[in-house]
Amino acid sequence: MTHHTTATSRRLRRAVAALTGVATLATPTFAAAAPDHDAAVASERASQAPESAGARRAPNLRVNTVLRGLDHPWDVAFTPNGSMLVTERNRGRVMLRTPRGNVRTLVGNVPNLWVSGETGLMGIEVDPRFRANRRFYTCHGFRSGSTTDVRVVAWRANPSLTSAQAVDNLVTGIQVSSGRHGGCRLRFGGKGALFIGTGDAAITGSARDRTSLAGKVLRVDRLTGYALPSNPFSGSSNANTRKLFTFGHRNVQGLALRPGTPQMWSVEHGTFRDDEVNLLQSGGDYGWQAGPGYDESPPMTNFDLPGPQVGAKWSSGNPTVATSGATWLTGPRWQDWNRRLAVAALKDRSLRIMQFTAGGSLVDVLEPTALNGSYGRLRAAEMGPSNILYLTTDNGDGADRVIAVSAS
C-alpha cells in the first residue's frame, strides 16, 4: 500500500559511491560525442547500506554523452539497426543518430504542433515491424482552427531514414487545457499493443471520466488506433471508453513493459506528495480525483472514492521528486541490477534503481551517485543496443543531451 511503500523507500533510498574521471563539460554543440573523450565520463563502483543485500554485486557504471545541443529532449526510441530517435518537446523535431554517431533531422517540423506549458512533442515509439514498414509513432500537442488536443500520430520514414511523413492520426481528442499535465508516453506491450499514458489536463473529474481519454493509460491497435477486443471496457458503446486500459491517473510520465512478462508499469507525477510507480491492472482505478477548481489536496490514490482502487507499488512521500521516464535494466553486465526498474527524476535530478518481486512488491531502492545531480533534470529512460541505458536531460536553453550509461 502507499504508506508502507513510502516508508520502505525512505529506508532504502540510498547508495554510496565514488566518482572518478569527471572533467569540465565543453560548450554544447549539436553533434555526437566520442565516448572515450567526452567530458561527461564518470565511472562508479556503487556500494549500499548493509540492508541492501543486492548491492554486493552492483555494476561499474560508465556515463558518456552521445548527443548534445538538444532542447528539452522528451523521449528516445531505437530502430532495429541501432539508430536512435529523439524528440525535442519545444522545437518539434525528431532527431536521428546513427550507430556510427552521425546526426541528422528526421522530422524538422511537426505539422500543427501545439507547444504550451508541459505539452509539445513528447513520446516516441518504433513499430515492432519497423524493418518492413518503417513506421514510428509520436504523441504531441496539436492545434488547427478550433481543434486543440493531444494526439498520437503514425509516421513512415523513407528507406534511407533521412526524412519521414505523417501517415495517420492514430488517436485524437486527448483532452487539454493550458498545456499542463499533457502526458504523454508511448510504449509497446505484448502482441503489438500500443500503450499510451496521458495526463488529466489539470481538469477536475477527467481522470475518472471513462468517456475522456485524459488521465488514463490507453491500449490500442498500433495500425488502426482502435481499441483492442481484450480491453476491459471493450463492450462499451463509447469509442473512448473502449480504448481505456486503466483510469484515475494524474499525469502519466513513464511506461515500461517488464521483460518476459505481460506486466506494464507506469510512472506518475504526484501533487506536493506521492509520485508513484504503478503495476497496471486491466480496468484498474488508480484513485486520482482532484477537488473542485482542481484542488490538489486529495491523496494521489484516494481509497475513499467509490469502487476499489489500486495502490501504488512505490511512492515518494512528501515532497515529490518528479519521477519521469522508466525502463527495466536487462543484461548480465548489470549484475544484481539486472531486471530492476530504472526511474528518472526531474526535480530531484537523479536516477532510482528499484527492485520488485515477481508479484510487484517493493524490495529495494538505490540511487547511484554517478547520476545524482551531475546532469541536472533527467527525463527519458530507455534501454538501447548492447543493453546500454540511455537517459535524456531536461534543463532547457539548448544545453540538453542524451547520455549513455553502460555497466560492467
Image (tube, rainbow, N blue to C red):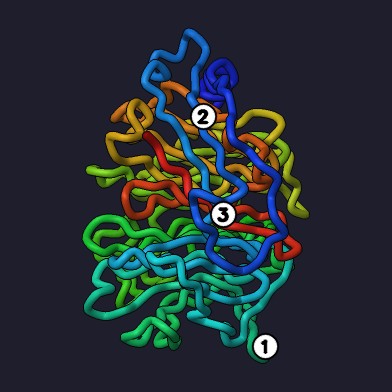
Q: Which amino acid type corresponds to the residue marked 2 in the rendered image?
A: Glu
From this view, report whether residue 12 is shown above or below residue 107: above
Q: Nearer the viewer, mark 1 or mark 2?
A: 2
Side of 227 where 117 appears, left or right: right
Helix, strand or loop for disc 1? loop
Q: Quadrant of residue 9?
A: top right
Q: Which amino acid type corresponds to the residue marked 1 in the rendered image?
A: Ser
Side of 108 where 346 appears, left or right: right
Tell me the number on the disc at residue 44.
Answer: 2
Give the CA separation, mark 1 to mark 2: 53 Å
Q: Residue at x 40, y 66 (%)?
A: 100
Is residue 309 something that shows in the picture? Answer: no
Residue 396 or 17: which is nearer the viewer? 17
Residue 306 image offset from top left, x and y in percent = 52, 41
Mark 1 sits on what residue?
146
Residue 174 image offset from top left, x and y in percent = 54, 70
Q: Earlier in the sequence, mark 1 or mark 3?
A: 1
Helix, strand or loop for disc 2? strand
Mark 3 sits on what residue?
392
Residue 167 or 48: which is nearer the viewer? 48
Helix, strand or loop for disc 3? strand
